[in-house]
Amino acid sequence: MEFKEAKNKFVQTWGALGSQWGINKTMAQIHALLMVSNEAVSMEDIMEELQISRGNASMNLRALMDWGIVYKEFKAGERKEFFTAEKDLDELAVKISRERSKREIKPALKILKEVSTIEAKDSAEEKHFVDQTSKLYDFVLKADNVLDKMTELNDNWLGKLFIKMMK
């Protein structure tokens, strides 16, 4: 397999996986392209490589920057905007975990807490509902706390040393 074919296959596969992770295909493809590029890539090159419109590229680049996994770079003498992706895979995992927690887990916890604290009247169905949603709330809260601890571990020097030793 030639380089161009391998790169295209990676970008397409990463894009397909992205939709399973809760982001759109184009956003994942842009991230993949930037992640494997050895230098910053202009929006025009991204548009050409992925055959997407300027609006689509701009909207998805903004979303990736909001996630903190893509950065804008300026090149002296250039009017174009250039972009690069986070290359440190540990840092990438931490940023994605934090963002998904903020966007998905925290809102789910809020709703679980709200629905699990209703006053169960006399029916077995209501008591079962409160019991199950309370258990689910406790489980998701513990999982979110573990995720928070793991991402905090990566933020301090001792945690980073521990993670390196585990590799």
Image (tube, rainbow, N blue to C red):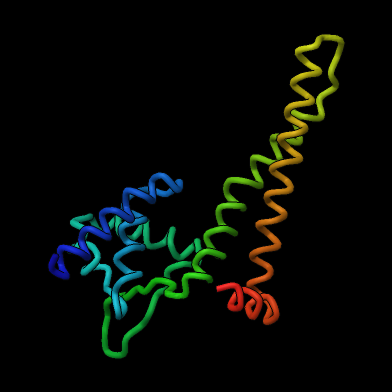
How far across and how far down the image is residue 29, in percent? Answer: 31, 57
Looking at the image, residue 125 lies above or below residue 43: above
Where is residue 123 shown, x and y percent of the image? Answer: 81, 9
User: Toward the viewer: 64 or 162?
Assistant: 162
Q: Quadrant of residue 139?
A: top right
Tell me: residue 164, above or below residue 51. Answer: below
Quadrant of the rendering where the N terminus is positioned:
bottom left
Relative horizontal placement of residue 14, taking residue 117 as reference (left or right):
left
Residue 50 picture location, percent across and down:
21, 58
Residue visible at 46% across and 67% down in the picture: 69
With 12 as the anchor, is 155 left or right in this view? right
The image quarter containing residue 86 is: bottom left
Look at 38% across and 46% down and name the residue there: 19
Q: Residue at x 36, y 55 (%)?
A: 27
Residue located 55% across and 73% down the image: 167
- In the image shown, does 104 or 42 lie closer to the viewer? 104
The outermost residue toward the left is 2
Q: Give residue 157's position: percent from left, percent from top.
A: 67, 82
